[in-house]
Amino acid sequence: MVNNTIKILLADDEPDILEFMEYNLKKEGFQVLLAKNGKEAVDIAKKEKPQLVILDIMMPIMDGIEACRHMREIPELQNTIITFLTARSEEYSQIAGFDVGADDYISKPIKPRIMISRIKALLRRVNGSANSSSAIPIIQIGNLKIDRESYLVYRDELPISFPRKEFELLSLLTSKPGKVFTREDILARVWGSDIIVGDRTIDVHIRKIREKLGDESIKTIKGIGYKFDI
């Protein structure tokens, strides 16, 4: 049974889905918070600071994409895991979600055992990152400084905001400048082997990092993966 100090915020405008998910999560010992729209979800997240947020894409007042964007602008929620609920055919929604800082997605129709497994995998991944003592706490490359303990990135001493997965991907690539990391290695080390995401996921995150650091920093090695150039 999971410690009930772990808070999970569910946001969906369909009461049946909220009730169904709440029941299954409470059975696993999680503390569950509920929101009926994106604005309510942002307000609750700001106040309660949950470890995990699950957002439906299509919601009234404020949709899931906009809610995620707002949450990622709140410093206290920078390390909160944010996952979207999406229909299998909505690849565009998944890409949009990653664009605003989502960590993962859960496909509809929701299957309880898969949902719980996915959530536990995400929480294990985050706890593993937080408790790892082997990682160098601070990486300094030229004018770029990456503080792995506080999840902060600075360029010329100015802070740059990175959602968790972008930060972990940048941290991995900069841990060994010049080394080529294969796509398989990146997926396993950033997302974990028990979390299923596609190649497009890496591409979206690389694009977002390049937008913040510049195209010259991360090189694409065609057919293999990526490396951080010195």
Image (tube, helix red, strand yellow):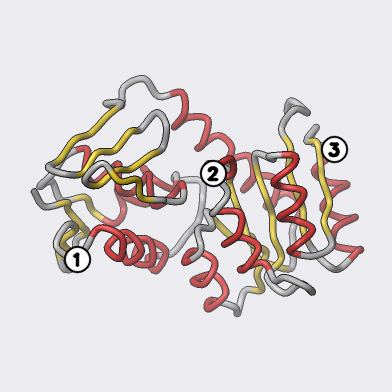
- Between the C-alphas of marks 2 and 3, the distance is 31 Å
Which of the labelled discs sits on residue 215, or is there none? 1
- Between the C-alphas of marks 2 and 1, the distance is 26 Å
Q: Nearer the viewer, mark 3 or mark 1?
A: 1
Dot 2 or dot 1, earlier in sequence: 2
- Kindly check if marks 2 and 1 are in contact, taking CB atoms under 8 A apart as contact: no
Residue depicted at 22% across the width and 59% down the height: 225
Disc 3 target residue: 27
Disc 2 target residue: 75
Residue depicted at 60% across the width and 79% down the height: 89
* On screen, residue 12 above or below 19: below
Q: Position of residue 138 (x, y in %)?
A: 27, 29
Secondary structure under tag 2 reads: helix
Residue depicted at 50% across the width and 37% down the height: 125
Q: Nearer the viewer, mark 2 or mark 1?
A: 2
Give the class, few, some or many, for how many residues have Cα within 10 Å of label 2's Cα (few <14, many ≥20): few
In-image side of 64 versus 179 (left or right): right
Q: Amino acid at mark 2?
A: Pro
Residue depicted at 39% across the width and 28% down the height: 149
- List the single residue furthest toward the top: 133
Task: Depth check: give the residue in front, 219 or 36.
Answer: 36
